[in-house]
Amino acid sequence: AKHYYVVLCLQSCSRGPPLLPCKPKEGMQSVLVGPFAWVPANPDGFNFPEYLENLLEALEVTAPVWGCLDGRKLVPYQACMRGSDWELVSPRFAELFQHQRAAYRLLHGGKNAPKVKPAAKPNLLNAWTTDILPLDDTTVLEERNTFLSISEPLKVPLSGLQTRRPAEYP
């Protein structure tokens, strides 16, 4: 594989969030297109990596999707996944997403609908994320120049440590 990761970008959501596939329920605003009924995703706190995982789940595909790359958060409309996973799923995903686009146009009107495509480059936020580090409440994370220093409390009682004298030099 030429690329280890692919950054995907969500575009053209001018009339609201993209739609999620679901089973039709009584009283729910949904549009039946293809094998699914489609409902709007929650606009409050929309999370593109989560949305992408939900679409992959509808395809019965389990592949990790991240909202960060190299320890830095991606902008809210981008997500990252393994390039090999994307190569395997992209033809089926494209077909499913075409149904979503048709349902979006039916529900909201107009000729534009959301698009998902590989981004030319990742757009990273200035903030670093610690979501990928296994930190607990006692761990201190400190930024020093361009490095992150992780300080963890000692897990061994000090009484059990042997003391050594400094080495003597001539």
Image (cartoon, rainbow, N blue to C red):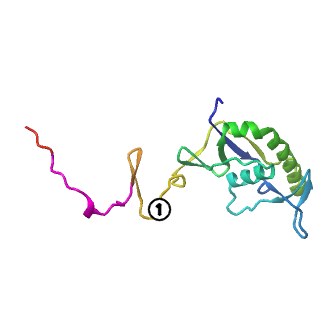
Dividing the picture into quadrants, the one containing residue 119 is top right
Q: Which residues are magenta?
A: 151-166
- Magenta segment, prevailing SS (helix, strand or loop): loop
Quadrant showing the C terminus:
top left
Residue at horizontal 68 percent and vertical 49 percent from the top: 77
Residue at horizontal 77 percent and vertical 52 percent from the top: 57
Residue 19 part of the magenta-drawn span: no
Residue 154 part of the magenta-drawn span: yes
Above or below residue 2? Residue 94 is: below
Q: Secondary structure at mark 1?
A: loop
Residue at horizontal 84 percent and vertical 50 percent from the top: 100
The location of residue 13, given as percent across then percent down, is 77, 51
Residue beneath disc 1: 136
Quadrant showing the N terminus:
top right
Tell me which amino acid carries mark 1.
Asp
Is 119 situated left or right of 111 in this image?
left
Q: Residues within 10 Å of mark 1 (few under 14, many from 20)?
A: few
The location of residue 91, given as percent across then percent down, is 81, 38
Observer able to see residue 13: no
Q: How many marks?
A: 1
Residue ranking furthest to the bottom = 27
Is 37 situated left or right of 7 in this image?
right
The location of residue 56, given as percent across then percent down, is 76, 49
Observer able to see residue 91: yes
The location of residue 84, given as percent across then percent down, is 69, 36
Residue ranking furthest to the left = 170
Residue at horizontal 18 percent and vertical 52 percent from the top: 164
Is 26 situated left or right of 51 in this image?
right
Q: In terms of depth relative to the viewer, which is nearer, 62 or 9?
A: 62
